[in-house]
Amino acid sequence: MEKLNEKKGNGIALLPFLIFVSVYLISGIILQIQGVEMAFYQFPAPVAAIIGIIFSFILTKGSLDEKFDIFIKGCGDDNIIIMCIIYLLAGAFSSVSSTMGGVESAVNLGLTLIPAKFITVGIFIISAFISISTGTSVGTVVALGPIAVQLVEKGGLNLPLVLGALVGGSMFGDNLSIISDTTIAATRTQGVSMKDKFRANIGFAIPAALVTAILLLIFGKPINIPETQEYAFSIIKILPYIFVLVASIAGMNVFVVLTGGIIISGVIGLSYGDLKVLQFVQEIYSGFTKMFDIFLLSLLTGGLANMVSSGGGLDWLLYKINKKIKGRKSAELGISALVALTDMATANNTVSIIINGQLAKEISTEHNVDPRKTASLLDTFSCIMQGIIPYGAQLLIAGSFTNGLVSPVQLVPYIWYCFILAVFAITSILTPFGNGYLKSNSKINS
């Protein structure tokens, strides 16, 4: 059988993918120059994918029916469909649990438990918990941003440092949360369980978070200690998040976990009067619709990737990359660099994982990289880059809360967690550090 690295493929077949990314990138740059807010998020990614697909139909050999067959098979790939259903359930859980007061209770619990003199590190810890519970870094920044700015004013704190702690904590959870779309995309494209990816990931993510927390304790002390305030919270309303996190780590089927989380959130909301029966149903559907963009993009890119692959595009790229890769370590570094650079171009960490998922899987197979490690690296380096690009949603939104006092560019040096995470992640590639779970569990449970 011919080896992967002996298949030279066809570089022209990659053109539709390049067109997809280029349209997405160039539109963002043009809108940014024009002064449009959230410029890199104005041109819908699914539309850019459609443009790439049209070019793929033009370039792919065969009849129109044969081309459609290749495209539809890519859209209907088992992993793509499973990924899309998980997106829907994750969106529903997030919507229902937030509406019944789960996010507010979690934030207020954190503000109650963490002493006022530890505001900066407290913001980091609270944002990490909120994002790992809700699966959204953007939602975490939106929920905590106004509170963080208010606490900065009362405590005489360094505003960029506090907002940097907020963004860093939100990216911690985005990277590790089992209901984050980045985790869903990374695990499904590599064919591994969320439990295994989580355990492989925490080997270097937790040490990075601890170092960040220590630095924030040292350099984030307030000049004035703000007055203690009472924040209303309910432990009961936080239970759905705890259930989802614990059940996922325990290895329970993800569909059961998310469905259980939705039901528990609904029961709590109905019991407390925060939800009516009809509203509960409507919130589930609202959660579905919030995931429409990423759902549609996953289907379209699945079809596009299959057309590019059938034309020899992935074989060509793999052939070129393999000439540079000398072994497992350089393969892991290559995968990390690919997803980080793609995120820099698209300003969307989930999109960058979806684009690189199949290629990363091919490289991993060719160079004996543990797919659990590949999934964690895809997720980690996409989140690292997403957390430090000044045109990413997280920094744009965080900067908007300062009323022009601090620009997203000024926040970049203060996203300490992302930089420290990059150091620990690269260390885990070059040394045995952080790979304890993979070594002690060599049999892959997918």
Image: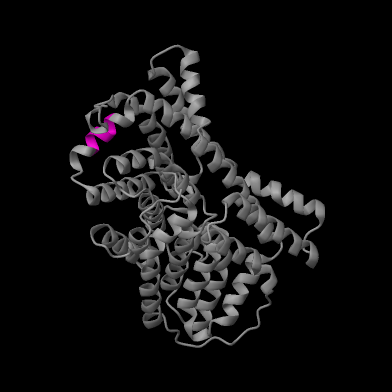
For this view, does 325 lie left or right of residue 137? left
The residue that appears at 41% across and 18% down in the rendered structure is 58
Decide if residue 35 is in sight here: no
Q: Is residue 313 left or right of residue 52?
A: left
Taking 62 as reference, is 42 left or right?
Answer: right
Among the 4 quarters of the image, the one containing residue 107: bottom right
Judge by depth and name the residue closer to the eye, 360 or 169: 360
Q: Is residue 361 visible?
A: yes
> Residue 214 falls in which quadrant of the image?
bottom left
**Looking at the picture, how far across and down is residue 104, in whole percent?**
64, 68
The percent coordinates of residue 207 (x first, y second) are: 36, 70
Q: Give the x, y percent position of residue 92.
A: 65, 51
Which residue lies at the image location 55% right of the left edge and 66% below the top edge?
A: 130
Quarter of the figure with the N terminus: top left
Residue 223 in the image, given as x and y percentages of width and height: 44, 87
Q: Nearer the viewer, residue 423 or 341?
A: 423
Q: Which residue is drawn at the image coordinates 27% and 35% (left, top)?
A: 318
Say if 126 sits above or below 391 in the image: below
Which residues are drawn in magenta? Answer: 316-321
Q: Is residue 261 above or below residue 151?
A: above
Q: Give the tally of numbered discs.
A: 0
State whether residue 318 is above or below residue 397: above
Q: Is residue 3 left or right of residue 197?
A: left
Closer to the camera, 319 or 94? 319
